Amino acid sequence: MSAHHWGFIFDGPGLDPKKDRMVIDRGGIRTVLVGVPSVSEAANTAVELVEESAQFLELCGGFGPAGAARVIEAVGDRVAVGFVSFGAESLSKIAAVFAPQT
């Protein structure tokens, strides 16, 4: 089996998985990028992507291990789920991105 359909889920306040979605279909590979506002919406979206034939899923690092675990639980053993993580050298930089604005 070759990989030809996968999904990437990212999070952000106010995102709507029905509207904040982009599909790239090129060269026999279908990539679906979906923005969600919460971990629970990520789990629902993951299930929908699997039902739409996604063969594997990737999650934004913002979900962290606990959020990824909730998505993995939602899809069960139907597909592989991976998630982005940041190395120790990047933690201060990513924290600065999400620091409250003054």
Image (cartoon, rainbow, N blue to C red):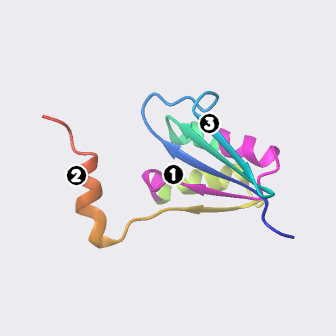
Q: CA distance from mark 3 to mark 1?
A: 20 Å
The disc labelled 2 sits on which kind of residue? Ala
Q: Secondary structure at mark 3?
A: strand
Q: Is residue 57 magenta?
A: yes
Mark before the other along the chain sequence, 3 or 2:
3
Q: Which residue is mark 1?
A: 67
From this view, report whether residue 54 is shown above or below residue 16. below
Residue 33 coordinates in the image, percent (x, y): 61, 45
Q: Is residue 85 magenta?
A: no
Q: Secondary structure at mark 1?
A: helix
Bounds of the magenta segment: 44-64
Residue 99 coordinates in the image, percent (x, y): 22, 45
**Marker disc for residue 21:** 3
**Marker disc for residue 96:** 2
Residue 82 coordinates in the image, percent (x, y): 60, 63
Residue with the most extreme right position? 1
Q: CA distance from mark 3 to mark 2?
A: 27 Å
Residue 75 coordinates in the image, percent (x, y): 72, 52
